[in-house]
Image (cartoon, grey):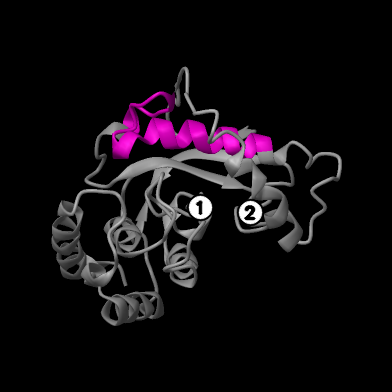
Amino acid sequence: MKQKSLAKMPVKMPVKMSAADGGKIASGVPEMLRILGEDPTREGLVRTPERWERAMQYLTSGYNGGSWNGPGIMSTDSQTLSNGLAYALGVADYAQAPGFVPGLSSNQIEIKYTLVGDLDLNSFVNGIDFARLAQNFNDFDTNWVDGNLIYGSSIINGIDFSQLAKNFGHIATTGASVTLSAADWAVFDAFEADHGVGAAVPEPASAAIFALSGAALLARRRKRALHI
């Protein structure tokens, strides 16, 4: 497993899973590999389903509803807002999105402390990340690299969009704003208007997030002129 981090990522043990659930996540990975044109029986990929299931168990358990203090992979830095922005542990498996995450090679899984919404783990939340989320909006059985930012949820919807929106146009290392094109902002705003953040079916999270996201989006608009 490839690990790149801006902070320590201790692992709390053990991560418990019922016998009835064991193997369910792994069972779907071979078909995903076949869809991507890979041979799941090829040497080097045989244990990929097992590795992916274990990684998701650690992350989902450590996420602990966004507190990042549960058993599994957790992050002390992700437990609080930094620079007024939200951080998390992003995860990417090359087998799920070949070529999407820079520097990630076959048979590698990368876990990185970064901004919520940094789907390609390059430390920026920009048009590339948003386009990926928009492409998979309302899809099920998705992951971080698809735009599913709430561990333990199976669908990408308005809460994922709201989480990305809070960090849109920022860099993880300093929290500073980055320049986005007028086209990026236009597509972003059009998507927001067409779908409506509050119109999506909520994921398993507090409904208060919607109220907070509205304030965050208004703040973003007031500051946006400085980014273009």
Which image quarter: residue 65? Answer: top left
Q: Residues within 10 Å of mark 1 (few under 14, many from 20)?
A: many
**Horizontal relation, residue 87 to residue 9: left or right:** left
Where does the magenta region start and end? 50-78
| Amino acid, disc 1 | Asn
Q: Residues within 10 Å of mark 2 (few under 14, many from 20)?
A: some
Q: Main secondary structure of the magenta part?
A: helix
Residue farthest along the front direction in this orientation: 20
User: What label sits on residue 153 in the rendered view?
Assistant: none
Q: Which residue is mark 1?
A: 143
Residue 91 is situated, as x and y percent measured from the top left of the image, at 52, 43
Residue 203 is situated, as x and y percent measured from the top left of the image, at 31, 55
Which image quarter: residue 35? Answer: bottom right
| Amino acid, disc 2 | Gln
Pointer 2 and pointer 1: residues touching (CB < 8 Å)?
yes
Asked if 142 appears above or below 60 in the picture, the reply is below
Residue 228 is situated, as x and y percent measured from the top left of the image, at 32, 72
User: What label sits on residue 96 in the rendered view?
Assistant: 2
Asked if 197 appears above or below 115 in the picture, the reply is below
| Residue 36 appears in the rendering | no
